[in-house]
Amino acid sequence: MDPIVAAAAALAGVAFVGIGVGAWFLSNPYATPKDRLRSASDAAEKIRPKAGPADPILRRKSEVPTLLRRVVALAEPAKPEEISLLRQSMLQAGFKSANALEFYLMARVLLALSLPLFVGLLMPETQLAVLALALLAAASTGYYLPWIVVNQQYQRRKQSISRALPDGLDLMVSCTEAGLALDSAFDRVAQNMEDAAPELSHELQLVTVEVAAGMSRQEALRRLEQRTGVPELGSLVNVLIQADRLGTPVAQALRVYASTTRTRRMLKAEEKAAAISPKLTVAMVLFLLPSLFVVILGPAMINIIVDVLPSLVAP
């Protein structure tokens, strides 16, 4: 093998391995809410927060190596508002590492450079126009692939939290009506739902840890809304904050909202069930009816070709 080709393949392989290892550390699946809060507190002591959104996690600028910063600068947005939105998107997708955005931008740059290299190695004798289109498609795919992964992770996490929220609200209503405070109810619900709904459980645990660390309940709830991006959970946060301000019973407010959430989930299930008939109609027209026509009309067409056409053609 050509030494240049071997070196290029080795560099591309190292890039892919680095992206995979970085993504694993970025997801940090074994970190508990206490670990994340401890790392955020340690970073806050060293780094002065810059002006930005209300959430300190979203406006924190982490310390990254110089080489990584230069690679990230190739894909980093120019406007601070876009950077803040990207940090919030990474947070809502479940990537809570301090350098989540930096690893994300680095993956975009490395994939946009390494995938065309692989395509060029696989297509050495292709025409120039075809090779140029293939390299452009590979670079575009590598650049947008991390965004697709983050978006799918966010949608999966959002659906998981939305699906488990009504059951969590029922447990929360039972805990508050039994005499537990709201923070204790959050902790109890998080412990009971850790196996069934780990995403919702970890978020509720993080709320209780933040409140225990001295943060106000309203701020902790607002941070919960920012971290998840789930509309149902945002409505729950508004209900709890309003009940806290007006002094209304939390158990009663939770019971009403739990009933509303279950009704909304039932309506969504009915909407999906109603959409099955049009989908089945399209599938039947495209796949079942042609096969049915072949089965019914096929023998008749064969008989016509074998018996009728020779008699029409014969003198």
Image: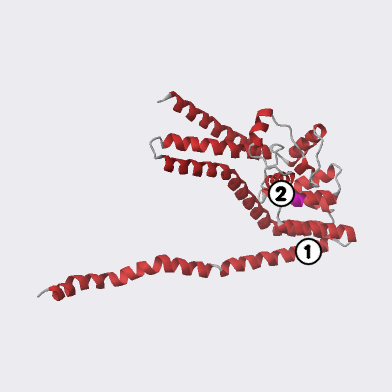
Q: In the rendering, at what x and y percent does residue 274 appear? A: 57, 70
Q: In the rendering, at what x and y percent does residue 158 appear? A: 66, 53
Q: Amino acid at mark 1?
A: Arg
Q: Amino acid at mark 2?
A: Ser
User: Residue under circle 1?
Assistant: 255
Label disc, if present, on residue 188 of the rendered structure: none
Query: Mark 2 near mark 1, Cβ–Cβ under 8 Å?
Result: no
Which is nearer the eye, 313 or 262? 313
The quadrant holding residue 286 is bottom left
The quadrant holding residue 176 is bottom right
Picture quarter with the C terminus: bottom left
User: Residue under circle 2?
Assistant: 201
Residue 201 visible to an observer of this rendering: yes
Which is nearer the eye, 240 or 16? 16
Q: Main secondary structure of the magenta part?
A: helix
- Residue at the far front in the pictured view: 129
Picture quarter with the N terminus: top left
At mark 2, the secondary structure is helix
Residue 269 to residue 131: above or below: below
At mark 1, the secondary structure is helix
**Rendered residue at 71%/46% (across/down):** 82
Q: Is residue 140 left or right of residue 181?
A: left
**Rendered residue at 31%/72% (across/down):** 296
**10 Å neighbourhood of mark 2: few (<14), some, or many (≥20)?**
many
Is 48 within the magenta?
A: no
Which is nearer the eye, 182 or 210? 210
Which is nearer the eye, 232 or 146? 146
Give, as a single range, the part of the protein colored magenta: 224-228
